[in-house]
Image (cartoon, helix red, strand yellow):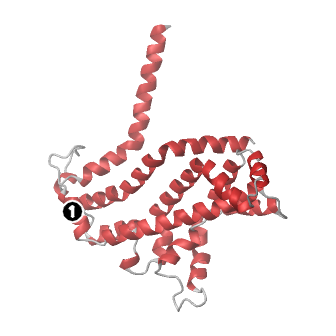
């Protein structure tokens, strides 16, 4: 019996390492390529660890490309979109979870329906919308931060996720707060939001990641190099440098850093948020 347990443990560790390498392997290869010379990248057989570390690749992408401006644009777009989505989606989720009003279930089904529409199908109507916004000039919101952020800022997924979490919070707290003289907004702001930090962190991570990695919509709106986001800059970077893989991977490594920092900073809340959402679904 003891021998069988050891064998099962060994098999578990082997499988865990195999799965880990499937997910982590591409990132390790990306970082290793970013530190190689162009000749070493094209050498055969390929090597994982560079024979000589070329940190100059990271200096070159910041000095000789549009990457710095694109990095700044992505930070602005992703941060503002995250704040907008967390605030307005939580307001809508509070209404669906705690208030009673006509057509409540029908409106929530309409929100869920937006999650079933492929994002690519929304490009044309959204483009027409921001192109023809009144009082914004002949180009509307094209080539602007407003065009990059607002049309896709609030997501049905965030409303659904937060509603499920809010449902796991006892409604007795609302009644006690109302007895103490709190308005509906004060209940939302002072009670529901502080108790929902894990779910809010979950929405923040997903929203920031989605906007940071967005390519198609940003490519549609951005018309000048000054409005490029990080993903567009990396795509243009290939043509600009004739597919110099070391510089492309250095740019991709740089683009991955903010998301890694955000994830590890919010990881405890992230895990709690998943648990709370599961509880809300049972209710």
Q: Residue 193, relative to residue 275: is it above or below?
A: below
Give the x, y percent position of residue 261.
Answer: 39, 51
Residue drawn 59% across and 43% down?
274
Q: Nearer the viewer, residue 46 or 135?
A: 135
- 59 displayed left or right of 132: left
Q: How many marks?
A: 1
Residue drawn 68% across and 57% down?
188
Give the x, y percent position of residue 5.
Answer: 48, 14
The residue sitting at the top extreme is 1
Q: Nearer the viewer, residue 105 or 92?
A: 92
Q: Residue 57, relative to residue 8: is it above or below?
A: below
Give the x, y percent position of residue 226.
Answer: 37, 78
The residue sitting at the right extreme is 102
The residue sitting at the front extreme is 180
Q: Nearer the viewer, residue 26 or 153?
A: 153
Q: In terms of image quadrants, where is residue 253?
A: bottom left
Q: Nearer the viewer, residue 57 or 71?
A: 71
Q: Which secondary structure, mark 1?
A: helix
What is the crowding at mark 1: few (fewer than 14 residues within 10 Å), some, or many (at least 20)?
Answer: few
Residue drawn 47% across and 80% down?
144
**Residue beneath label 1, please?**
59
- 179 displayed left or right of 2: right
The quarter of the picture where the C terminus appears is top right
Q: In terms of image quadrants, where is residue 257?
A: bottom left
Give the x, y percent position of residue 112.
Answer: 70, 59
- 194 displayed left or right of 62: right
Does residue 76 appear anywhere in the picture? yes
Q: Residue 114, relative to residue 279: is it above or below?
A: below
Q: In terms of image quadrants, where is residue 118?
A: bottom right
Does residue 156 appear anywhere in the picture? no
Residue drawn 25% across and 66% down?
62
């Amino acid at each position: 019996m003891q021998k069988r347990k050891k064998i099962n443990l060994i098999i578990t560790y082997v499988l865990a390492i195999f799965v880990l390498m499937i997910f982590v392997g591409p990132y390790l290869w990306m970082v290793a390529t970013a530190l190689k010379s162009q000749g070493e990248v094209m050498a055969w057989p390929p090597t994982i660890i560079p024979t000589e570390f070329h940190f100059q690749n990271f200096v070159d992408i910041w000095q000789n490309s549009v990457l710095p401006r694109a990095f700044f644009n992505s930070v602005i777009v992703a941060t503002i979109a995250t704040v907008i989505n967390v605030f307005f989606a939580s307001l809508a989720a509070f209404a669906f979870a705690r208030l009673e009003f006509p057509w409540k279930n029908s409106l929530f089904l309409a929100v869920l329906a937006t999650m079933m529409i492929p994002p690519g199908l929304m490009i044309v109507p959204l483009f027409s919308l921001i192109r023809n916004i009144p009082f914004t000039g002949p180009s509307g919101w094209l080539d602007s931060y407003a065009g990059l952020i607002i049309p896709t800022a609030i997501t049905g997924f965030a409303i659904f996720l937060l509603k499920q979490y809010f449902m796991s919070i006892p409604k007795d707290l609302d009644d006690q707060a109302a007895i103490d003289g709190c308005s509906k907004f004060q209940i939302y702001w002072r009670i529901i939001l502080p108790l929902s930090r894990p779910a809010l962190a979950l929405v923040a991570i997903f929203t920031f990641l989605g906007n940071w990695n967005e390519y198609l919509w940003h490519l549609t709106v951005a018309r000048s190099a000054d409005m490029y986001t990080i993903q567009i800059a990396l795509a243009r970077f290939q043509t600009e440098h004739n597919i110099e893989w070391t510089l492309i991977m250095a740019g991709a490594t740089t683009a991955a850093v903010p998301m890694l920092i955000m994830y590890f900073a919010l990881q405890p809340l992230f895990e709690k948020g998943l648990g709370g959402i599961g509880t809300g679904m049972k209710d």
